[in-house]
Amino acid sequence: MPYTTEEGGRLNNFAQEPKVYQAEPPTGKQKLNYVILGGLGALLIVGVVFIAFAVSNAS
């Protein structure tokens, strides 16, 4: 681990830095998967809201 010595003889311990890399843009298949999952998520939210309204107006 990288140590530095400061004034007065104190040691300072620095964390190891992670390796930096550049992210790659998503492929066409990954983009399609994002769209499908987004649609399914929106459908789930709409379904839950519909059920909530149906149950609250049931009486």
Image (cartoon, grey):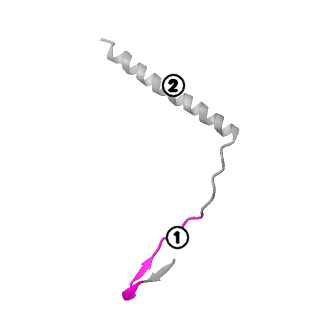
How many dots with numbers? 2
2 drawn magenta: no
Q: Which residue is mark 2?
A: 43
Dot 2 crowding, Cα within 10 Å, few <14, some 14–19, many 20+: few
Dot 1 crowding, Cα within 10 Å, few <14, some 14–19, many 20+: few
Tag 2: amino acid: Leu
Q: Give the residue drawn at x 62%, y 59%.
A: 21
Q: Give the residue drawn at x 38%, y 15%.
A: 54
Question: Is residue 30 positioned above or below 48 on the image?
Answer: below
Question: Element type at marker 2?
Answer: helix
Q: Closer to the camera, 38 or 54?
A: 38
Question: Element type at marker 1?
Answer: loop
Tag 1: amino acid: Gln
8 drawn magenta: yes
Residue 39 at x, y percent in the picture = 56, 28
Q: Quadrant of residue 51?
A: top left
Question: Is residue 2 positioned above or below 24 on the image?
Answer: below
Quadrant for the C terminus, please: top left
Q: Quadrant of residue 7?
A: bottom left
Please give left or right for residue 1 compared with residue 9 in the image: right
Residue 14 at x, y percent in the picture = 47, 73
Question: Is residue 7 positioned above or below 34 on the image?
Answer: below
- Residue at the top extreme of this rendering: 59
- Residue at the bottom extreme of this rendering: 8
Residue 43 at x, y percent in the picture = 51, 25
- Marks 2 and 1, how far apart at CA: 44 Å
Which numbered dot is residue 16? Answer: 1
Q: Closer to the camera, 7 or 12?
A: 7
Q: Which residues are magenta?
A: 6-19
